[in-house]
Amino acid sequence: MSIKVRHELGGALADLGVMIPLAFSLIALNGLNPTAVFLGVGLTYIAAGWFYRLPIPVQPLKAMSALAIAQGLPSEVIAAGGLWIGAALLLLALTGTISWLNRLFPRSIIRGIQLTVGLLLLKTGLELALRPRFALGGGASLAPGLEVAAVTLVIITLFLWRPLAPAALVVTAGGLVAGWVAGVWPSQGVAWGPVAVRFALPSPDQWWAALILLAIPQLPLTLGNAVLATADVAREYFPSGASRVTPRALALSGGLGNLLAGSIGGLPVCHGSGGLTAHYRFGARSGLANFFIGGLFLALATIFGRAALALIGLMPLGVLAAMLAYVGGQHIQLVTKLSTRFEWSIAILVALISLAAGGNIAVGALVGLLVFGAGRLIARTWAPGVAMEGDSDAA
């Protein structure tokens, strides 16, 4: 296997720390069809790799997933939520509104969103490491997550320093083997093959619940992180290769991915700046990584659909926690690209307000925009000769 292929394969697996916990929880707790979940994710990953030719990620809609899990919403409501988001993204892209929103958000707001995402990833990783279980599937009496996470971070650091093998591939494979050796695999065995995909049309009440409880809280976050921030990070990592990764294109592909997911009762998805950082930092540099991870999800859907919970349950929580923590730290570093104290102040303000609002990035971005606008107005009034960010360099 060539070095390039190994790096692409390792980078392909780097975002599992976000996908696996949410997908597992929605399948186990909300009754999502595992075949529908992995089929939708796999096809969307492959389509994104083919079109963008870069490792553009496919992630769960995090706010929607968390709200659905917390409120115990049925699969029909989750499907309707995905259809609402898909329709909204397509409308914004086809009408050109997304381009206007892109000009509205200055660089400091985008970096503030990315800073918030990084901090939230660190928080999620710590929460996973503190759970009193060895793996997703159980094993309470085995090594605590913090110790496993610490060892995993050391392994990640060593393999990134001396890239004998892709770090994400090493820790993912090692984690699955550790779960199997620890006896997390169900003793009674598992069934194999796909689960039949059937879509039940949501009732009017379920459509309304999906709009109010899921779609409206999710949409501002999707626009900020999955569309605008992802386009910005793509330009940062691939200055000459990200011409296709525009806010309009990301809104279109995200919209189509959610229409697919909603129509088969799968997992509502988005792109994401954190996921792109994960793929990039662990070695992915092209759409080949998407074909690897997309193919893996298609295999999970068709061959391992009935055994999906058992397979996912092998993964030690500490391994997932370490991957999230590493990606979060790398994502936070993006804020260092800002150059002025005003930009730094706005980015930090966005993060602080978002965290104070329970991780609601939309609230932080709104406050940041208001403060940014007020600051620019004051500067133009009292110092008209001083150029400020946003006059010609909007994200």
Image: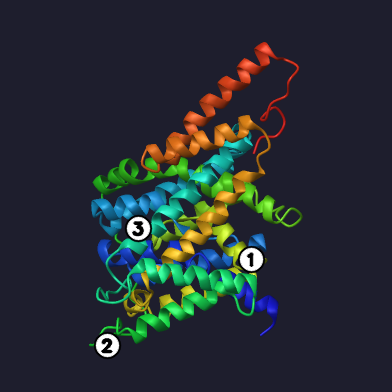
- Amino acid type indicated by mark 2: Gly
Viewer-nearest of discs 2 and 3: 3
Of callouts 2 and 3, the N-terminal one? 3
Crowd around label 2: few <14 · some 14–19 · many ≥20 (10 Å): few
As displayed, is residue 279 above or below residue 92? below
Alpha carbons under labels 2 and 1: distance apart: 37 Å
Q: In which quadrant of the rendered image does the N terminus lie?
A: bottom right
Q: Nearer the viewer, residue 361 or 302?
A: 361
For residue 291, say whether it is visible: no
Name the residue that disc number 2 marks: 189
Name the residue that disc number 3 marks: 127
Name the residue rendered at 37%, 74% in the picture. 312
Alpha carbons under labels 2 and 3: distance apart: 30 Å
Q: Secondary structure at mark 3?
A: helix
Q: Quadrant of residue 46?
A: bottom right
Name the residue that disc number 1 marks: 50
Q: Secondary structure at mark 1?
A: helix
Name the residue rendered at 44%, 50% in the picture. 120
As displayed, is residue 353 above or below residue 284? above
